[in-house]
Image: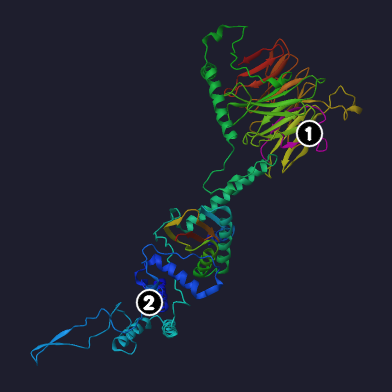
């Protein structure tokens, strides 16, 4: 019993430790990357319980800022294969368990 | 238009003209002159006289009588060309009858027009068609039609209204089409799982810790971390020069190894059966001679092998002369590259002793001639010691003769012990960024010194060695010729004292295998082997000159080597 309790504590610990936004893969230019990352963090924090609204917010802001036809996927467990315009992809982790993938393809 | 004018005038003038009966015969050339004459006579005396009468060349010459003759002309409406004797057959009489009334109309010009009366059937039909066509285009057109209608009523005559139309050059239309290149695309695929996320975070944390450590070590350097700007997968980009340095180092080693290949082979496998027979000449084969230019003038004062990297050893350079200039060096050589030292450290004063930590082989403790102890970290690229003892932190007042690393203490701080010429045995602990010292014991004064001065005049310690198994037992040798056995836990008194030599004991060492045996050598030409339980030595060897150093062989408990002042080294079994 003590072990499971410890295990849970450890889980909580690493979730805290790992909740910083961490870019897994990207080929965006520096400025764009920073802006997009901030936007994703804001959206995920605002709609912590509703991935769809967060994705909607991100997609609409990206469309306005950087041009049409952005796609956003937020989730905890998914696999994907996408075609994206070069220099317009961001794949990052956040909050210890969320993965966000943002790409442009018109 | 001008022609009918002329005809008109000529005709009218002809009516009143009496003089010219042959007016009809006059050609166009003559007509003009007639006009001139006519205008002359019509306008009368206003014209200037001096006009000669011009006659056409074919004018009939008539007599005056004939000229004055009055000719009557009558205008009739009869068509002179109409036939005057038209005859028609009358079926009643059965003969041809002349018709009196002949049609007198002479048609001079006939043109079929395309004007249609508005009220007639055809006109109405055409108007209807036009209206149908223009219904679709809207009210404007109707207005236009209405206006047109109005205009038609306006009677545009050719004197007031002039219509002109022209067509500009229309450039021929051309079709041009273009297709931009679509922005380049790439594929990307990945999986987002809980474990993937976790793994990546853990990796990232490790990476950050490493970079923090590096940064702490490189505080003195001004390198920037360029990896932040690149993709995570890209490695940190170091300068081309540093990469080149690494390659150059390897090449240097290879070259040296090739040159000294025979020597390296000897080092490993030398066995010469002739050694047995060579009495005084010496049977040790010198393998390498390691020299460093900047170390000229300095004598080698200390040597220490690196316990982890078997080919690396440390050399301390200083001087035994007290009057010479104070400087020293700490060099690290590797047998793989015997031409140049791997690491070079300059010290403020001569190095007297060197010790490398057993486990952390990058920590090197150095005892200096001016009594300081310093700790160098080989991993860090700086030239300065990591820790340094200063006067305030309890450095020795005499040259530090020996330093030895100890096991980490209870707080897992590294510590080492030093013995110096001021007679103190001091333990130094590396606490964070400082050296903290603790006096372990003070060497007792010799008997020859009067009691009053015992506290002042110190007996210099010359050598220090710790027991291999019982770490707290140590041996200290003094200049007075005594060897003291002490314990780290007793700070006031020694456990045992041995009267070893008549002169300075230069080295004392425990036997690595036998727990009770140690060896000592002194300037009194003797090498003595002791058992710690017995007060007098077990063996005594007399060599012809003063012995400066002695060491046990690491592979056998019965072999030791001794160095004497005449430059000879002996192995004894």
**For residue B501, above or below residue B221:** above
Q: Nearer the viewer, residue A51 or B164?
A: B164
Foreground residue among B55 and B136: B55
Q: Secondary structure at mark 2?
A: loop
Q: Quadrant of the C terminus of chain B?
A: top right
Question: In the displayed structure, does residue A79 sit left or right of residue B458?
Answer: left
| Residue B67 as seen in the image, left or right of residue B271 | left
Question: Horizontal and vertical percent for residue B395?
Answer: 80, 34
Question: Which residue shows up at 62% across the image and 15% down it?
Answer: B571
Quarter-wise, where is residue B290 in the image? top right
Instruction: Judge the density around disc 2: few (<14), some (14-19), many (≥20) Cα neighbours within 10 Å.
Output: few
Which class describes the residues within 10 Å of circle 1: few (<14), some (14-19), or many (20+)?
Answer: many
Tell me whether marks 1 and 2 sit on the same chain.
Answer: yes
Relative side of A18 to B315, left or right: left
Is residue A54 rendered magenta in the image?
no
Which is nearer the N-term, disc 1 or disc 2? 2
Residue matched to label 2: B69
B386 in magenta: yes
The part of the image, by quadrant, that contains residue B164 is: bottom left
Determine the residue positioned at 60% across, 6% down.
Answer: B279
Dominant secondary structure of the residues highlighted in magenta in the image: loop
Question: Is residue B60 depicted above or below B149 in this figure?
Answer: above
> Which stretch is magenta?
B384-408
Dot 1 falls on a residue whose secondary structure is strand
Kindly report which numbered mark, 1 or 2, lies closer to the viewer in this rendering: 2
Chain under callout 1: B
Q: Nearer the viewer, residue B187 or B247?
A: B187
Q: Which residue is mark 1?
A: B441
């Amino acid at each position: 019993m003590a072990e499971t309790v410890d295990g849970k504590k450890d889980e909580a610990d690493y979730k805290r430790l790992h909740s910083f936004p961490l870019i897994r893969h990207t080929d965006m230019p520096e400025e764009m990357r920073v802006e997009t990352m901030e936007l994703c963090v804001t959206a995920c924090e605002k709609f912590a319980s509703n991935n769809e609204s967060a994705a909607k917010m991100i997609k609409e802001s990206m469309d306005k800022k950087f041009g049409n036809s952005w796609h956003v996927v937020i989730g905890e467990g998914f696999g994907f294969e996408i075609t994206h315009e070069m220099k317009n992809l961001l794949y990052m982790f956040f909050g210890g368990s969320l993965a966000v993938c943002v790409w442009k393809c018109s | 238009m001008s022609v009918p004018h002329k005809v008109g005038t000529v005709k009218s003038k002809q009516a009143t003209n009496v003089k010219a009966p042959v007016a009809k015969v006059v050609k166009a050339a003559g007509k003009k002159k007639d006009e001139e004459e006519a205008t002359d006579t019509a306008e009368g005396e206003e014209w200037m006289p001096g006009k000669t009468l011009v006659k056409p060349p074919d004018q009939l010459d008539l007599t005056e009588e004939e000229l004055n003759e009055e000719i009557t002309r009558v205008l009739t409406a009869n068509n002179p060309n109409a036939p005057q004797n038209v005859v028609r057959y009358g079926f009643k009489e059965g003969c041809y009858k002349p018709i009196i009334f002949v049609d007198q109309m002479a048609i001079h010009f006939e043109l079929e027009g395309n004007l249609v009366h508005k009220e007639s059937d055809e006109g109405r039909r055409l108007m209807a068609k036009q209206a149908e066509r223009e219904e679709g285009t809207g009210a404007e057109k109707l207005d236009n039609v209405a206006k047109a209608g109005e205009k038609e009523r306006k009677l545009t005559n050719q004197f007031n209204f002039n219509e002109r139309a022209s067509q500009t050059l229309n450039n021929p239309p051309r079709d041009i089409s273009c297709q931009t290149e679509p922005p380049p695309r790439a594929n990307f695929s990945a999986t987002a799982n809980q474990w993937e996320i976790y793994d990546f975070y853990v990796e990232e944390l490790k990476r950050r810790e490493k970079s923090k450590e590096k940064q702490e070590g490189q505080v003195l350097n001004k390198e920037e971390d360029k990896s932040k700007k690149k993709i995570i997968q890209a490695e940190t980009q170091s300068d081309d020069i540093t990469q080149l340095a690494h390659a150059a180092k390897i090449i240097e080693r290879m070259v040296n190894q090739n040159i000294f290949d025979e020597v390296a082979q000897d080092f490993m496998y030398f066995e010469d059966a002739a050694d047995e027979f060579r009495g005084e000449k010496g049977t040790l084969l010198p393998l390498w001679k390691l020299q460093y230019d900047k170390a000229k003038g300095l004598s080698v004062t200390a040597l220490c092998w690196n316990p982890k990297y078997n080919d690396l050893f440390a050399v301390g350079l200083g001087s035994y002369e007290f009057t010479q200039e104070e400087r020293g060096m700490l060099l690290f050589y590797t047998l793989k590259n015997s031409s140049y030292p791997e690491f070079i450290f300059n010290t403020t004063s001569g190095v007297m002793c060197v010790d490398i930590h057993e486990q952390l082989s990058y920590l090197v403790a150095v005892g200096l001639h001016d009594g300081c102890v310093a700790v160098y970290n080989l991993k860090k690229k700086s030239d300065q010691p990591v820790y340094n003892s200063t006067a305030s932190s309890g450095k020795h007042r005499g040259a530090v003769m020996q330093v030895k690393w100890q096991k980490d203490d209870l707080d897992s701080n590294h510590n080492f012990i030093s013995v110096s010429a001021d007679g103190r045995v001091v333990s130094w602990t590396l606490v964070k960024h400082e050296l903290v010292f603790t006096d372990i014991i003070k060497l007792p004064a010799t008997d020859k010194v009067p009691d009053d001065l015992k506290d002042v005049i110190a007996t210099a310690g010359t050598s220090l060695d710790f027991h291999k198994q019982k770490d707290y037992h140590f041996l200290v040798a003094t200049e007075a010729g005594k060897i003291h056995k002490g314990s780290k836990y007793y700070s006031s008194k020694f456990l045992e004292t041995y009267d070893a030599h008549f002169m300075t004991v230069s080295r004392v060492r425990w036997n690595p295998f036998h727990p009770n045996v140690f060896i000592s050598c002194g300037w009194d030409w003797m090498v003595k082997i002791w058992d710690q339980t017995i007060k007098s030595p077990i063996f005594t060897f007399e060599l012809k000159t003063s012995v400066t150093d002695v060491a046990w062989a690491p592979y056998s408990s019965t072999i030791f080597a001794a160095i004497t002042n005449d430059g000879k080294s002996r192995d004894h079994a």
